[in-house]
Amino acid sequence: MNTRPMNYWLMKSEPDECSIDDLAAAPAQTVPWIGVRNYQARNFMRDDMRPGDGVLFYHSSCPQPGIAGVAEVCSAAYPDASQFDAGSPYFDAKSSPAAPRWVHVDVRFTRKTRLLSLAEMRQTAALSTLRVLQPGSRLSITPVSPEEWAAVLQVLAQAPR
DNA sequence: GCCAACGTTGGC
DNA sequence: GCCAACGTTGGC
């Protein structure tokens, strides 16, 4: 049995593709986190995520980027079927079912929150260490420390500034 | 649409 | 293994 402490993550999703409302409306309120094609992000899912890990659900590439809800990891990593689908934008000709290059986890809805905008996140000192706020950060999945997780939940419980 | 930052590719 | 060129991300 794995007894290591729970981990926390921030995961970016384009709301045009899958918003927090889409996650809430999905079957079993769960979506497969397909389409990650970055090795660092893949490695986080493959090596460091466990069911039960907390997820900050972040809307990116949209008019109001920011944290829109809370979710949790609800599977181990398994191969991303879209990498084998020649009709998919996520197709990867260099991958094969015998040696899948890309894996993903499933993510389940916990709750929708108020939108904690990127601008407000930047104004909040307790959140200044978040990876997603660092200059040039583009990674779609980033680790969140227990302290950062607690700080985000605390700010989410307050009125927007 | 712009552009800075970053990751990947591929020639050498 | 270096590194220039290219593609992508994502806020603005």
Image: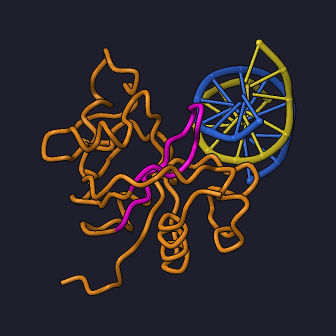
Chain colours: A orange, B yellow, C blue
Residue drawn 52% across the image and 54% down it: A40
Q: Quadrant of the N terminus of chain A?
A: bottom left
Left/right placement of residue A46 relative to residue A157 reads left
Left/right placement of residue A126 relative to residue B3 reads left
Q: Is residue A56 magenta?
A: yes
Residue C6 position (above or below residue A123): above
- Magenta residues? A54-69
Residue A104 point in image, percent of width and height: 32, 48
Residue A27 point in image, percent of width and height: 14, 40
In the orientation shown, which residue stands out farthest toward the bottom?
Answer: A3
User: Total of numbered circles in the picture?
Assistant: 0
Q: Quadrant of residue A53?
A: bottom left
In the orientation shown, which residue stands out farthest toward the left?
Answer: A28
Residue drawn 19% across the image and 46% down it: A29
Left/right placement of residue A39 relative to residue A28 reads right
Residue A126 position (above or below residue A23): below
Query: Quick one: A16 or A123, which is closer to the camera?
Result: A123
Residue A27 position (above or below residue A136): above
Query: Quick one: A117 or B9, which is closer to the camera?
Result: A117
Left/right placement of residue A70 relative to residue C4 reads left
In the orientation shown, which residue stands out farthest toward the front?
Answer: A159
Q: Quadrant of residue B10?
A: top right
Q: Main secondary structure of the magenta part?
A: strand
Residue A8 point in image, percent of width and height: 42, 69
Q: Quadrant of the C terminus of chain A?
A: bottom right
Q: Is residue A41 magenta?
A: no
Residue A110 point in image, percent of width and height: 28, 58
Residue drawn 57% across the image and 49% down it: A139
